[in-house]
Image (spheres, grey):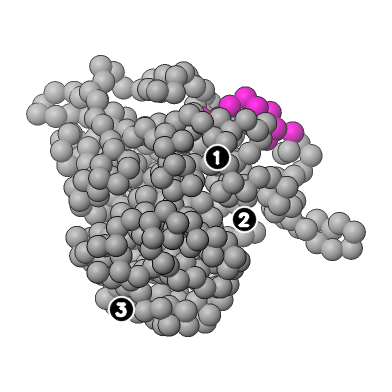
């Protein structure tokens, strides 16, 4: 049994800590830290009520490397699970190196002042983590995360070669609100408004955001418009699976969301550069975030399901084959178990599983690792045991463009 420090007390952090507490044989002691300690205390109270487990809480400014290092030294965890904002990945990685502790996160680093997310900043830590004998696992959420493991599973067990890969992310949930994001609004809007980008025959093809769409009939959700967009796991999958000729990411959006987003863009509310307002600088997107509902509060009102998976085409035993690996998660079921909606659940549970595999030694190594580099088998087994069961289907044809 081993201890863990979780940084970040939003919906994902809440799910991860609830699930850790439900598995005391894997996690002997849990500490939850955030800039706003009252949020940690609220999660701790919920955990105690639901599972009877008492967790520790702490106030932490994760932008402060020295403060983070000091907290790690005081808590003495074996793994730091970073569920804070992706802006803070590098400072937390620095603190882990300083304190000599393994690291895990769910999203790659991006700078505050530029809507640019890529793995280069974190891959640059490879030699330092390797020299320190420490392991850093990147992108251990659902996408990235589970979708990368689904790809590794397909390559290991279902296909001898992968030619094309499509990642399909559908949130069929309805919270009754005209515009709300299911994870951090600032990160969500930066991601959605970025130019689309996909891999085609070894080259990146870019285009305007949200301009290419197609309808897909998602099981237990129904037909939905899904849009081609860039997502971080495309970069790592292209690096570690160079055989794949085409890799694309698709996400569904409702018409109300897109209408509101278009208006907000047109009036400048999605800008990330500071503007002067009544004698002080504000960042419009950060102000908008303050006006929008906190994603962690949406659980009680959200109905419906998520459906996220991969469609891979390739060859098996000399014959062409297309496989679909997917998970369906119910918002109400997730809320009943953890007090959070399914988007947080599908990210928090994989973070818990990844940390458990690091603590148990089933995942080990020195350096920086993306999910698709690691053995998918124990992760896939734990998905079935901890609330995210997966299924595999053979398809008659690949996804059309």
Crowd rating for badge 3 (residues with CA inside 10 Å; few <14, some 14–19, many 20+): some
Image coords of residue 197 (percent x, y): 49, 39
User: Image quadrant of residue 96?
Assistant: bottom left
Would you place residue 127 above or below residue 82 in this image?
below
Asked whether the viewer can see residue 288, the reply is no
Where disc 2 sits, the SS reads loop
Residue at 52% over, 82% down: 66
| C-alpha gap between disc 2 and disc 3 | 31 Å
Residue 254 lies left or right of residue 222; in this view the side is right
Give the residue displayed 26% in from the left and 31% down from the top. 391
* Nearer to us in this view, 326 or 245: 326
Residue 132 image label: 3
Q: Which mark is residue 114?
A: 2
From the top left corner, tell me how far across and down residue 83 is, in percent. 47, 59
> Pointer 1: residues within 10 angstroms few (<14), some, or many (20+)?
some
State left or right for residue 174 relative to residue 360: right
The stretch of residues the image draws in magenta is 250-263
Q: Are marks 2 and 3 in contact (CB under 8 Å)?
A: no
Report the residue marked by disc 1.
300
Q: Position of residue 268 (x, y in %)?
A: 76, 43
N-terminal label among 1 and 3: 3
Mark 2, other Cα within 10 Å: few <14 / some 14–19 / many ≥20: few
Q: Is residue 286 visible?
A: yes
Q: Earlier in the sequence, mark 2 or mark 3?
A: 2
Give the CA distance from mark 1 to mark 3.
44 Å
């Amino acid at each position: 049994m081993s201890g863990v420090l979780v940084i970040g007390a939003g919906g994902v952090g809440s799910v991860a800590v609830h699930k850790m507490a439900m598995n005391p044989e894997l996690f002997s002691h849990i500490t939850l830290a955030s800039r706003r300690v009252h949020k940690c205390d609220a999660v701790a109270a919920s955990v105690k009520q639901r599972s009877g487990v008492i967790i520790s809480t702490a106030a932490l400014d994760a932008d402060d490397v020295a403060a983070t290092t000091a907290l790690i030294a005081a808590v003495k965890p074996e793994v730091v699970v970073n569920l804070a904002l992706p802006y803070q990945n590098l400072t937390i990685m620095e603190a882990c190196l300083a304190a000599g502790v393994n690291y895990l996160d769910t999203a790659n680093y991006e700078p505050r002042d530029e809507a640019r997310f890529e793995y280069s900043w974190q891959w640059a830590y490879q030699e330092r983590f390797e020299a320190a004998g420490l392991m850093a696992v990147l992108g251990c959420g659902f996408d990235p995360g589970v979708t990368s493991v689904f790809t590794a599973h397909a390559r290991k067990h279902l296909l001898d070669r992968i030619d094309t890969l499509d990642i399909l992310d559908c949130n069929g949930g309805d919270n009754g609100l005209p515009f709300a994001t299911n994870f951090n609004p600032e990160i969500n809007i930066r991601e959605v408004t970025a130019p689309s980008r996909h891999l085609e025959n070894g080259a990146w093809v870019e285009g305007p955001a949200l301009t290419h769409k197609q309808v897909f009939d998602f099981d237990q959700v129904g037909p939905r418009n899904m849009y081609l967009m860039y997502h971080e796991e495309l970069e790592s999958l292209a690096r570690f699976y160079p055989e794949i000729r085409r890799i694309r990411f698709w996400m569904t959006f409702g018409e109300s969301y897109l209408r509101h987003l278009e208006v907000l863009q047109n009036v400048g509310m999605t800008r990330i550069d500071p503007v002067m307002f009544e004698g002080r600088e504000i960042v419009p997107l950060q102000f908008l975030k303050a006006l929008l509902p906190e994603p962690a509060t949406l659980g009680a009102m959200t109905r419906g399901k998520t459906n996220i998976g991969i469609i891979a085409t390739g060859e098996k035993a000399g014959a062409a084959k297309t496989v679909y690996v997917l998970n369906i998660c119910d918002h109400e079921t997730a809320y009943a178990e953890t007090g959070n909606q399914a988007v947080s659940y599908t990210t928090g549970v994989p973070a818990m599983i990844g940390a458990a595999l690091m603590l148990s030694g089933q995942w080990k190594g020195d350096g920086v690792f993306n999910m698709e580099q690691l053995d998918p088998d124990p992760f896939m087994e734990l998905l079935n045991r901890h609330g995210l069961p997966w299924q595999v289907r053979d398809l008659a044809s690949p996804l059309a463009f």
